[in-house]
Image: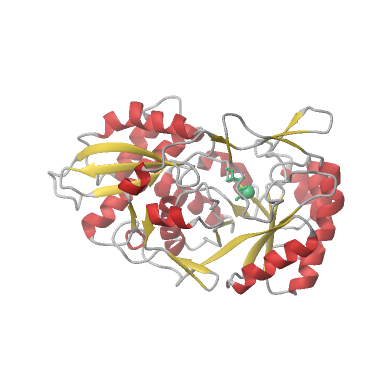
């Protein structure tokens, strides 16, 4: 039975596009009782497509619906569209789902994690990024993260002979993959150079930090199955917590080959949008961690489904949490994390101070861990006046070419 007063219906669904240093798309659902729910609809480099999908095709359908019917609304938007799945659709559904959970929390006076069954842990382990163009810079960055209390760190370094490398800023400033401008930046990529260098760097990082620190590394979809198997083998002694996105995400059966050659834990899924893309990776146990994100994979309701399937196969969640996942989605992910047994770790790349001001939040970081806080709902409040001061600015993720000029995966 619904806990929302019968009279309460969705009165408005508005889309905010703001760029406090980087672009974010946010959905605001308001009910006739005056409750407000927030959802993150940011899809890096394709922001306006989701904004239009929500404004033009979803918002009109929400008006007059019962906000308490979260699952029914999810099914309606998913099954009712015929052209289902895909990042734009699933990010839109995810934003609606988050906003409705936020409203249900405010209606009942409970933080969302309580509505999901309550806490199964006291706090959520998190990892952040360390980045250095060369080894001394990387070690310095790893040490700085450890001083901030992190017990899990992703290490990415430059590669000799390349000018740009995913995850690394040459200037030594924070890394932000999306570049402002009307077209994507073009990078030159050489997998052989990376494969010669990465094992040496990661071995040196492990030697520097000792056995305790959890070390992670992201290959960002760039290897063939054979290369991935070789890299996995070369990294066995580094004792990685996970090696991420070794091969392009569409190519799932190739992971059988990788698995036959290495026991390095594999994490995949930040670009997946539904449980169906995770299905064979989970049921064939081709991965150890699912990386699906609450905003890009249909919201809290759907992330819980993915977690439930993964749990049966002893596979754990380690959701995506880069700068393009807004503090609203991070809040949603943390509510799931606190209430979900097989949630292992949350990525937390962090935000510029202005982003924390626009998206005020109850979640907090302390001592290598995150907690969603105990405010009703998701515990986020968007400062709309401040947000309006930073209109959308065109920005794209880079594209990559091999040395011969042909396109490859970024
Ligand atoms: C990533 C992201 O955090 C990660 O693991 O792979 O940096 C990713 O490149 C961006 O989210 C793309 O929008
Ligand atoms: Mg990644």
233 horizontally vs 216: left or right: right
* Residue 406 or residue 244, whichever sits in front: 406
Q: Is residue 360 visible?
A: yes
Name the residue: 38% across, 52% down.
358
Depth order, front residue of 263/45: 45
Write the residue at 31% across / 57% down: 377
> Is residue 237 at all visible to an observer of this figure?
no
In the image, taking residue 129 as reference, residue 231 lies left or right, namely right
Above or below, 47 relative to 3 = above
| Residue name at image x 23 percent, y 43 percent | 30
Q: Position of residue 45 (x, y in %)?
A: 54, 35
| Residue 38 spot, x, y in % from top left | 33, 47
- Give 152 or 272, whichever is nearer the viewer: 152
Q: How is the image coloured?
A: secondary structure
Residue 302, position as x, y percentages in the image: 44, 46
Residue beneath the point at 22% across and 40% down: 10
Horizontal side of residue 205 vs 176, given as left or right:
right
Q: Is 34 left, or right, of 92 in this rendering?
A: left
Q: Position of residue 8 (x, y in %)?
A: 16, 44
């Amino acid at each position: 039975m619904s806990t929302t007063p019968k009279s309460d219906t969705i009165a408005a669904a508005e889309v905010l596009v703001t760029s406090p240093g980087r672009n974010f798309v946010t959905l605001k659902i308001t009910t006739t009782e005056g409750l407000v729910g927030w959802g993150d609809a940011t899809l890096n480099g394709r922001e306006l497509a989701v904004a239009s999908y929500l404004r033009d095709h979803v918002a009109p359908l929400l008006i007059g619906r019962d906000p308490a019917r979260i699952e029914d609304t999810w099914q309606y938007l998913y099954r009712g569209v015929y052209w289902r799945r895909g990042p734009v659709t699933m990010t839109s559904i995810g934003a609606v789902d988050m906003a409705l959970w936020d409203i249900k929390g405010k209606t009942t006076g409970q933080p969302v994690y309580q509505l999901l069954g309550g806490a199964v842990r006291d706090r959520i382990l998190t990892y952040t990024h360390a980045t250095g163009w060369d080894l001394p810079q990387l070690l310095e960055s790893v040490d700085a993260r450890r001083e901030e209390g992190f017990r899990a760190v992703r290490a990415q370094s430059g590669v000799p002979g390349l000018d740009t490398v995913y995850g690394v800023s040459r200037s030594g400033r924070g890394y932000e993959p999306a570049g402002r401008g009307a077209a994507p930046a073009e990078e030159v990529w050489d997998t052989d150079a990376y494969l010669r260098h990465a094992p040496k760097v990661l071995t040196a990082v492990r030697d520097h930090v000792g056995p305790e620190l959890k070390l992670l590394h992201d290959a960002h979809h760039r290897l063939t199955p054979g290369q991935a198997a070789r890299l996995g083998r070369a990294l066995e002694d580094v004792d990685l917590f996970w090696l991420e996105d070794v091969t392009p995400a569409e190519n799932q059966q190739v992971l059988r080959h990788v698995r036959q050659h290495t026991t390095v834990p594999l994490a995949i899924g930040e670009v997946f949008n539904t449980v169906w893309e995770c299905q064979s990776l989970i049921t064939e146990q081709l991965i150890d961690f699912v990386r699906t994100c609450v905003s890009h994979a249909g919201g809290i309701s759907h992330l819980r489904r993915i977690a439930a399937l993964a749990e049966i196969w002893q596979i754990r969640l380690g959701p995506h949490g880069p700068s393009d996942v807004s503090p609203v989605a991070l809040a949603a992910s943390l509510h799931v994390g606190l209430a979900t047994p097989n949630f292992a770790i949350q990525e937390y790349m962090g935000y510029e101070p202005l982003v924390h001001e626009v998206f005020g939040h109850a979640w907090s970081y302390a001592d290598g861990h995150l907690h969603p806080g105990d405010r009703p709902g998701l515990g986020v409040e968007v400062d709309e006046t401040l947000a309006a001061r930073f209109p959308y600015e065109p920005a794209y993720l880079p594209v990559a070419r091999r040395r011969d000029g042909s396109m490859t995966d970024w």
